[in-house]
Structure formats: C-alpha cells, structure tokens
Amino acid sequence: MPAAPAVPPPAGKGARFRARFPGLRRRSVLVPLTAAVVLVAGTGGWYADGGGGRSTTAPGGDGPGEEVAPLARSMQLPWPREGQASVAVEGIGSLGTRGEQKPVPIASVTKVMTAYVILRDRPMRAGAPGATVVADQRAADESYSSVETTAPVLAGRKYTQRRLLELMMVPSGNNVARLLARWDAGDEKAFVAKMNRAAAGLGMRSTTYTGVSGMEASTRSTAVDQLRLARAAMKDPAFRRIVATASVTAPGAGVTFRNTNKLLGHDGVIGLKTGSSTPAGGNLVWAMRQEVAGVDRLVIGVVLHQRAGTSPAEGSAAAHEAGRALIAAVRAELPAAANRAP
C-alpha cells in the first residue's frame, strides 16, 4: 500500500482528501456535477460497409476521411451499434468508419489535444523530464474537488513537465490540465485558442474546444477528427511514452494511480486515452501494434458516444467493450486480409 501523504492537505480539506482517497486508492466514480454532467476518472465522413454501416466518401487528405483501404473490404469488423467509431492502420490506410460523423461531447478525450499542444510548444525527448513547472495555489485547491477527476498537487512544489503530463493523461487529472494550460499560455482561454488553431491546422473541421480538460459538454468532435489528431500525436515519441504509462505516483502525496485505459498492455495496446461523462457517454481512443505481412504497424481506433445519457461508469464500460471487440477483430483478420491482398 502507498505511504501516507508526506504533506498534509490544507486545513479544512483533510476530510475531503481522505474521502477522495480511501486507503489512498484512486476513486473510479465521482459525485455528480449536475443532473446532466457527471465525470469519472478518465473517455462529414465515409462509412464502411459492415456492421450495418453505409458507404460514402469524405474530403481527402492523408488522415481519416481517406478512402477505405482495399484490404479492409474483406474484413468484418464488429462496429459498435451506437455512437461513432473509426480505425486506421499506418502505412495501409483506413479500415472504415461507423456512425454519423456529427460533433458530440468527448469528455476527457479532450486531453489528447491538450497534451499535443503542450508538447508542440514545449518539446521534450521521450525519456526526458522536460521543463520544470511550479504548481500554483489554484491547482492545489482543485486537487480536493469532489465533482471532477483530479490528481493531487501541492502549491509551490516543483514538478517536471513529464510528471504533470502523466498525471493529466493516466488518471485524467482535470486540475493538472488547467495548470499546464496556464503554464504554457498564461491563461486557459489563450490555451483553448491554441487548441482550436491546432485542430484547424490538422483539418479537424468538425471539432470545437471550449476547455482544456473535457469538463465542458460544449467541447465536441467526431471519431474521424479524433483519429486524425491521434495519428498526429502518436508521431511524438514523448507522447507515445506518456500514454503507454501503466501507473503514476503523485509526488509528495504518496498516491499511485493506474491508467484509466483498461486495455493498455493487452493485445498489443500501447495507449491512448479514455473519457466519460453523462452527456458524452463512454469514449476511448486506442493504439496498438500489429504485425502485418512481416511489418510492425501502428493501428489507431476511436470509439465515441457509447451509452450517452447513462452513468459515466456504464458509458466507460461500453466504450472499453467496443474497443476490445475491434482490437480482437483487427488482430484476427488484418494479417489474413493483407495476405489475400494483391
């Protein structure tokens, strides 16, 4: 069991700290924000035939929206019956997209863009600690929130850029996302503007960011756009290392968090990010390695809006189930499909 926090929480907040970390274990369900928004630890296109989808064609480019790869037409992927999903293989192309590509809330999947912008602005080597960031009082106070997913930080303490990115991506700390945004851009509004400019630069035409953590249901995107972002983000070795992190300990608090992505480490999965809320449902961006015709390939998939309107726990479970089914099918069928291809 992890050691007790080395530094006690601020006066008056100790009870909430103990309630949020019973036995110093990460919680999995949060108190409702409102009747409409509850967060838990964190989730115009073509439609491939199969799973009831219909075929059409989207604007081109080398990311999602491209034509379905010919070998995918012989594959029967188990697309989720609701929401949206999209899968692509680097060096091969799209395996298809399912669901109407209309913008929907994406919850903590938002943090993929937050991390992407931070690493674009403040590059770091894969194994390096990066820059030094001093936690402000606001981030520390928000550590004890009972209405959102957070990670404990101490005001005035120095943290490495890498550790904060891990605390944002592994247990999905909203307060850490906001701290990083203020550190990078001076304030959160300026950072959100950077996120939207980055989205436009990547051709994410159906995406609007209104916050840095995914707390806001007004942050909306599509599976096609999030797949485009994930493909860009995974080109950064530091990002790949961070999203593959199985667990992270909060310095000074003695609390260890496991990655919210329950598929990580199984069936070749090496990332990427979960997100869930009542309006967003369950959301999962996943990345895996798969050998295809003797070549190691990166496969990335996105599942959005699973069981929206239910509890975040139910949505998260549905997103993981949908992701697991797609991954199993890709592993089983992609190598054979590649061997059949001319």
Image (cartoon, helix red, strand yellow):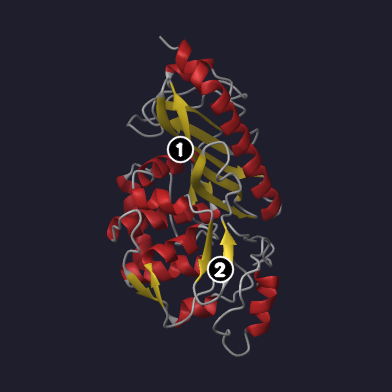
Q: Position of residue 227 (x, y in %)?
A: 44, 40
Identify which amino acid the numbered label 2 is placed on: Thr
Mark 1 residue type = Val
Quadrant of residue 22 in the image? bottom right
What residue lies at 36% left-to-right and 30% top-to-bottom? 59
* Image x and y of residue 235, in percent: 34, 43
Dots 2 and 1: beta carbons under 8 Å?
no
Q: In the displayed image of the protein, which residue is found farthest to the bottom?
A: 11
Q: CA distance from mark 2 to mark 1?
A: 28 Å
340 left or right of 332?
A: left
> Which residue does the numbered mark 2 point to in the structure image?
150
Judge from the rendering whether residue 202 lies leftward or rightward of residue 31; answer left or right: left
Q: Is residue 152 visible?
A: yes
Among the two numbered marks 2 and 1 on one chain, the one whose residue lies closer to the N terminus: 2
State the residue at coordinates (49%, 32%): 87
Give the label on residue 142, or none.
none
Quadrant of the rendering where the N terminus is positioned: bottom right
Residue at the spot of label 1: 224
For disc 2, the neighbor class at 10 Å (few under 14, some 14 to 19, many from 20) is many
**In the displayed structure image, the side of residue 290 where residue 327 appears, left or right:** right
